[in-house]
Image (tube, rainbow, N blue to C red):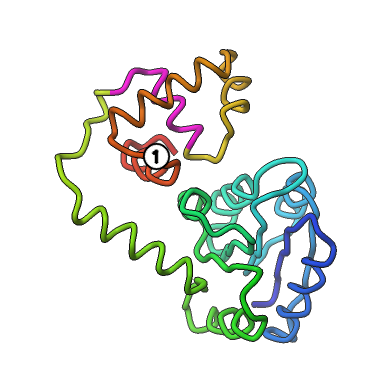
Amino acid sequence: MNRVLIVDDLQDARELLTELVTAGFPQARISTADSVAAAQAAITSQGFDLALVDLSLADGFGTEVIALLHEQQPDCMTVVASIHDDDERLFAALQAGASGYLLKDQPAELTLRQLQHIADGQPPLSPAMARRLVQYFQGRHQGDGAPVADGALTPREREVLGLLARGFTLSDIARQLEISRHTVGDHVKNLYRKLDISSRAQAALHAQRFGLT
């Protein structure tokens, strides 16, 4: 890992991640960004082998950075570094193209070991997030009913589903589609009912299956 990008809007977090990356990859040239805009500028001007990306940024979502890296630098190993451990953020990040997901509150020694394993082709995943993945797919395996067909959704519902999967909030979707937030909420309710789901993470998986991301 010779070229590393760290994206986080908190200086303390950037410094800690920089220390860990330096310890794991002493030869690495490290670039940092404190916003989506700064990360986008770095990505368009430099190539990276590894990117550590926070999901909550002042000017947008880390998933935007992850998606851009996945599109423009597919060989870059993109890993989330976040305090959030919920299903929605986990699956939204993986859907956007993340290869791993680390929790900031886990021991630094564990994070360092997981980063070092990247050189062996092992994407890092915090134990808590690995358990969530297992629990989710075990639930899918035990679920009932046939998958809903793409044609069961209206064109507007497909638009909303695609934006949900990309991490947009209901207010963001309303602005994007030039409709009211209340109307977006109604579309989301209909989507959840038709798809028999209860979370944004599940919506992201359906969006991928329908080719909406």
As for residue 154 lying within the magenta part, the answer is: yes
**Residue 53 in the image: x percent, y percent?**
66, 59
Which percent across, then down, holds residue 62? 64, 50
Looking at the image, which residue is at 58% across and 14% down? 180
Residue pointed to by mark 1: 203
* Quadrant of the rendering where the C terminus is positioned: top left
Name the quadrant containing residue 176: top right
Q: Nearer the viewer, residue 70 or 98?
A: 98
Q: Secondary structure at mark 1?
A: helix
Q: What is the crowding at mark 1: few (fewer than 14 residues within 10 Å), some, or many (at least 20)?
A: many
**Residue 5: x %, y % from top left:** 72, 64
Amino acid carrying label 1: it is: Ala
In magenta, the rendered stretch is 153-164
Q: Is residue 149 above or below residue 145?
A: above
> Is residue 120 located in the magenta-colored stretch of the structure?
no
Our reading of the magenta stretch's main secondary structure is helix
Q: Residue 200 occupies which quadrant of the picture?
A: top left
For residue 60, which quarter of the picture? top right
Task: Return the residue found at the far right.
Answer: 11
Quadrant location of the N terminus in the rendered image: bottom right
Q: What residue appears at the point 64 percent right and 86 percent down from the top-left corner?
A: 109
